[in-house]
Amino acid sequence: MAATRTCPSVVDRYFTRWYKTDVKGNLCEDHCILQHSNRICVITVAESHPVLQSTNKIKSISYQISANCSRLQNKVSGKSKRGGQFLTELSPLCRIMCENGEEYTIYSCIRGRLLEVNENILQNPSLLQEKPSTEGYIAIVLPKFEESKSITQDLINQEMYEDIILKRDILAAEPLNTDTSDPVTPSVV
């Protein structure tokens, strides 16, 4: 009987996964950066992000960052992609509002020029939950050529990310010890 082989997906085949965990100190709000060999980076949410973990539905997604800044107004042109908004590691890309009132901000996590935002998730927010690494991506960012090797310094690879997730799962499974008395020494009343 022949063993069935599964081919790797396009994402697994052509992109390197990098992760930023607990972005801006928010526990489990992990982001994933898919880096192609041509320097282009696709920003999305990591598998452990609360948006993907909860059964809560996404109410809306907004690329309006402030009164004067909308990522939807980003226009690039030409071979060198002139006109794209420049992002730092902590530049917000969008805000995700859930039906239960929770709100999450997705950050760039890398420095570079914003090439495009995914307008498809505005009309169909469930794409973000169903296909976060493909059709549900957040944005595409192009790092500067001279920074393209160093952008991953503050990120972790997939193996390290899986170790962090495993440690979180172990900590979550451990029962909390609320008994503060010493089990060896009897308490005096």
Image (cartoon, helix red, strand yellow):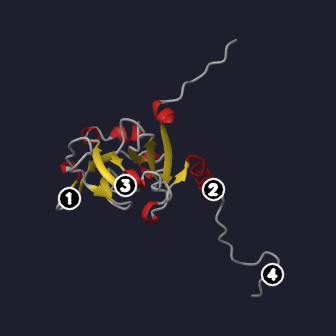
Mark 1 or mark 3: name the one nearer the start of the chain.
1
Q: Position of residue 151 (x, y in %)?
A: 45, 55
Badge 4 or badge 3: first in the primary sequence: 3
Question: Do we see residue 97 in this rendering?
Answer: no
Mark 3: which amino acid? Ser
As rendered, which of 128 and 143 lies closer to the eye?
A: 143
Q: Is there a contact, CB below 8 Å, between mark 1 and mark 3?
A: no
Q: Which quadrant: the N terminus?
A: top right
Dot 1 or dot 2: first in sequence order is: 1
SS label for mark 3: loop
Q: Which residue is mark 1?
A: 69
* Near-viewer residue (62 or 186): 62
In this view, the residue farthest toward the bottom is 189
The disc at residue 108 is: 3
Q: Which residue is mark 4?
A: 186
Residue drawn where x is 36% and y is 42% of the image: 137
